[in-house]
Image (cartoon, rainbow, N blue to C red):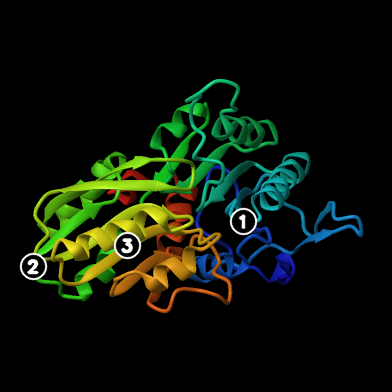
Amino acid sequence: PQTPAAETRPRPMSSAYGDITLISGNAHVELSKAISENLDQPLASARVARFTDGEVDIKLDEDIRGRDVFVLQPTCPPVNENWVELLLLLDTLRRASAGRITAVMPYYGYARKDRKDEGRVPISAKVVANTLVACGADRLVTLDMHAAQIQGFYDIPVDHLYARPVLLDEVEAMGLDNPVVVTPDVGGTKMARAYAKRLNADLAIVDKRRISGSETMIEHVIGEVEGRNCVIVDDMISTGGSITQAAAILKAKGAKAIVIAVSHAVFCGPAVDRLDAAPVDAILVTDSIPQGEKRPKKLKVCSIAPLVAQTIRSIHTSESVSSLFE
């Protein structure tokens, strides 16, 4: 991404780490621009390109010595490309003597492997943590990790934001009467309970058993959903198998409207086709991941740019970020 040179920048808020600088990788330029606009702070002038053999080629076009730098780069698909690009951006900034380097990853790739759940497998989320810190990250900002305990893999500050306030504003605007919040997985009960508290709604759980990494078998529903409007919440939609199966069984149990509210729309494999065929009335997601041309017909994207911008502002000025976690 290209922006004007440093001389044309407005002087930002004060910080112990020098002036604020925003740098964007290529993973999600649209979100980076939206965050930049919310902060009224241009993106730094930098070249994040490729050599002819596909290797990442980075060059900063301005001096960032002593600055408080925020690298905007979710590790969304293509995960490996975006991950390596982020690591090289961090290394570039460290070698250019940045005052503080914060990796802003709205989507944290490789988060599903957060423990050794069987023999001869990696703990991929830990590998991501190790490489980010080794390449120069002093702080991490992320949104709705697949497993919140990944924060413990870091010995640097981690600001773990939630998309809940952004998605709930849209759910409340729908004016659903007699709602019930549903989690398609027992592991998502804590997240669903937080949504239910804000909506003053009951909670239901779809009990499932996993057959493989991409297939699940629905067992039964715990809670009353007949004649009620259901809001299914989860941290991500990958292939869409679990959440569309949950929607189908809720409809079979007599649910009225069914709304899906999910933080990260990964949408890989047959996800879009499955969601279009599912008995849902609306699909709410954030813009933590850029969407391609093929997307579900009932999709509505809610922007997290104001939330991330406020987090960056609070970090830069050494103000509390904890209020944004609620």
| Residue that carries the numbered disc 2 in the rendered image | 227
Which residue is drawn at the image coordinates 41% and 32% (left, top)? 149
Q: Position of residue 224 (x, y in %)?
A: 8, 54
User: Tag 1's secondary structure?
Assistant: loop
* Residue type indicated by callout 2: Gly
Q: Is residue 183 above or below residue 7?
A: above
The residue labelled by disc 3 is 261
Mark nearer the N terminus (3 vs 1): 1
Residue in the foreground of this view, choosing between 169 and 234: 234
Question: What percent of the width, then of the height, locates residue 106?
Answer: 50, 53
x and y percentages locating residue 31 in the rendered image: 54, 66
Q: What secondary structure is marked by label 2? A: loop
Contact (Cβ within 8 Å) of mark 1 with mark 2? no
> The N terminus appears in which quarter of the rendering?
bottom right
Residue at 48% across, 53% down = 312
Q: In the image, is 3 to the left or to the right of 21?
A: right
Q: Name which of mark 1 and mark 2 comes first in the sequence.
A: 1
Rounded to the nearest angstrom, the CA distance separating label 3 from label 2 is: 20 Å
Q: Is residue 301 left or right of residue 138?
A: left
Kindly indicate whether the residue at mark 1 contacts the one at mark 3 (C-beta within 8 angstroms): no
Q: Answer above or below: position of 172 versus 138.
A: below
Q: How far, Cα to Cα, is label 3 from label 1?
A: 21 Å
Kind of residue sitting beneath label 3? Ala
Q: Which residue is mark 1?
A: 77
Q: How many marks?
A: 3
Query: In x, y percent, where is residue 226?
Result: 9, 63
- Give the amino acid at mark 1: Pro
Q: In the orientation shown, which residue stands out farthest toward the right?
A: 52
